[in-house]
Amino acid sequence: MRGLITIFSFLLIGVLTAFYIGFGLQESREPRAIDMELEGLNEKYLLRFSHVVAENTPKGIAASMFAQLVREKTDGWVEVQVFPNAILYEAQDEFDALMSNDIHIIAPALSEVTVLDPRWLVMDLPYVFQDEQMVETAFNGKIGELLFESIEEYGLHGIAYWDNSFKQFTNNVRPVVVPEDIEGLTVRVMPSDALIDTYRALGAWTRLFPFNEVYDVLSTGIIDGTENTLSNIYSKGFYRQQKYMTLSNHNYLGYAVFMNRDYWDSIPVDYQNSIIEAMDEVTLWLRDHSKVINEEMLNRIKNSGQVEIHYQTEAERSLWKQSFKPIYEKYGRIIGEELMKEVIKLQEATP
Ligand code: LMR
């Protein structure tokens, strides 16, 4: 009997061991169904998007629209939290914050990017773009491509170019019609050497203040004037502190939307695709609507009766362009041949 029990015990252990080993082998033979592209898809991503303007401006509206589209396209697995009005950071501080993953998306004005890389000064040459069509060709063509390439070495990943509009000149001292009218004025500009030299060429002084300090420095008379788009001039109330505005369209204010390259690469491909889709939709929407929004803001400024408005004529425009020739000579060298060649090509192709 004892012998039978011993044999039975051995058999039982044998069967159990075979079952265990067999199961184990079977598991290692069959590949586990892991699709690397789906890795992380059950993890929620929270992207903090910081910008400096008001919510009722082209960039403000675009950022909120983008957040909503991303939520819809990812069923809420990617959430974009928008922080407008420099609640978190002023434009220049956004770059470091992006690199340290404090925030995840920024859309600084192109002039702000020139501090990081001088090639971006190409977008700040006075009167470089004649109209919106030319700007779009630059954004979507070789110029846009070269600029995004240039920024990769700083760990940034360019996702889109966003529109605002052309900049206008405002001041409190006198109507500005001919270049000499600007002489002696103190003007706030963004931190771009080309903008500083543009005013210097006209005998004006420049001061660099973050966007959200401009209203205060205008109202206290620290500066006489400033340049910005109609949507920024209206939404931040600059027009209430200025007597004169020249519709000069002398520079384009556009934005580059950036993410931190490493952070971007860590997002699962499916979510990246949804983010790109949302971004493309918003970028197209802006292309169609930013000019209209700015025109609407012009009406509001006009209706306020606060500002005397001068519409620059073609003849005046040519006069201003003459004054800026030295800027092109100096910055052509800094920006580099490759980009300048593209600018010339673009200008020659524009009737
Ligand atoms: C500025 O003047 O600093 C702005 O144009 C900022 C912006 O992002 O539009």
Image (tube, rainbow, N blue to C red):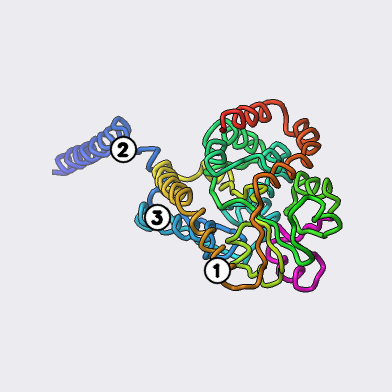
Q: In terms of depth relative to the viewer, which is nearer, 180 or 208? A: 180
Task: Judge the density around disc 1: few (<14), some (14-19), many (≥20) Cα neighbours within 10 Å.
Answer: some
Q: Nearer the viewer, mark 2 or mark 3?
A: 3
Q: Which of marks 3 and 1 is in front?
A: 1
Task: Judge the density around disc 3: few (<14), some (14-19), many (≥20) Cα neighbours within 10 Å.
Answer: many
Residue 346 position within the rendered picture, expressed as x and y whole percent measured from the top left: 59, 31
- Residue where numbered disc 1 is placed: 300
Check disc 3 and give the amino acid type: Leu
Residue 183 position within the rendered picture, expressed as x and y whole percent measured from the top left: 84, 54
Q: Is mark 3 on a helix, strand or loop?
A: helix
Residue 234 position within the rendered picture, expressed as x and y whole percent measured from the top left: 60, 66
209 sits left or right of 133 in the view: right
Q: Residue at x 66, y 26 (%)?
A: 341
Q: What element carries label 2?
A: loop
Q: Residue at x 63, y 68 (%)?
A: 236
Task: Judge the density around disc 2: few (<14), some (14-19), many (≥20) Cα neighbours within 10 Å.
Answer: few
Q: Residue 189's image quarter? A: bottom right
- Residue where numbered disc 2 is placed: 33
Q: Residue 246's image quarter? A: bottom right
Q: What element carries label 1?
A: helix
Residue 181 position within the rendered picture, expressed as x and y whole percent measured from the top left: 80, 55
Spatial separation of the CA atoms under disc 3 and disc 1: 30 Å
Upstream in the sequence, badge 3 or badge 1?
A: 3
- Residue where numbered disc 3 is placed: 69
Instruction: Please identify the quadrant where the N terminus is shown.
Output: top left
Q: In terms of depth relative to the viewer, which is nearer, 317 or 187? A: 317
